Image (cartoon, rainbow, N blue to C red):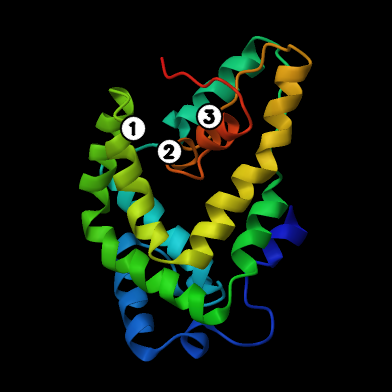
Amino acid sequence: MMAALSKAMLTDGRTLDQVVSPDVFAEVKKRAEKAGLPMMAVQRMKPWLVALTLMAPTLQAAGFKPELGIDQHFFDRAKDSGMKRQALETMAFQIDQFDALSPKLQEEMLKSTMEELDTEVSGMKDMAEAWTFGNVAAIEKLTLKSLQEAPELYQRLLVDRNRNWIPHVEACITNKSDCFIVVGAAHLVGPDGLPALLAKKGYKVTQQ
């Protein structure tokens, strides 16, 4: 865990203000102070981690709680029931996906995240409503539009991971196991989503 997390930190002696533009750093400082995040810690983070870190307090302030996420909900239910649990990927892999982004793309990710933070709350509420009613078109628009504007991010964070997960899903089908697979909403929609990829392989996919 510590080895993986160390990849998210600046360890070459530089600090955040030395790897992003003055304008971006000034905005980071303003938002971090507003969220009560210590700048001493933020200064040591790589830009992609700062982007993720700034999102959390914004969503929590709007009433969204990490422990009530749908993935955590079903993980806890499975654990309490003594069911076997298996991850589609490791945390180390997830961190590597972000860490492999170029410095320029990391800064762009941080900048766009801060620009969208003010509308993130209403967007999350719209997303929750769309998910509740199974509105696939709305979910696709809300989750994929901005990501598709950054092709490298879209490819790395969605497309490649979806393709990596297909063998795990097929293993459940082949072994006729009763598998319950939980993934983020963005992985369920669009031409590169898991349902679309499975349909291309000849499987019948239905929405209930």
Pointer 1: what residue? 136
The label shown at residue 189 is: 2
Depth check: 47 or 196 in front? 196
In this picture, is 195 found above or below 20?
Answer: above
- Residue flagged by tag 1: what amino acid is it? Val
- Residue flagged by tag 3: what amino acid is it? Gln
Percent across and percent down for residue 40 are 50, 75
Lateral position of residue 26 relative to residue 201, left or right: left
Q: Which residue is found at the position 41% from the left and 58% from the top?
A: 147
Q: Which residue is found at the position 43% from the left and 29% from the top?
A: 68
Q: Which residue is found at the position 35% from the left and 42% from the top?
A: 140
In front of the other: label 3 or label 2? 2
- CB contact under 8 Å: marks 1 and 2: yes
Q: Counting residues from the N terminus, which is met first, the one under dot 1 or under dot 2?
A: 1
Q: Counting residues from the N terminus, which is met first, the one under dot 3 or under dot 1?
A: 3
- CB contact under 8 Å: marks 3 and 1: no
In front of the other: label 3 or label 1? 1
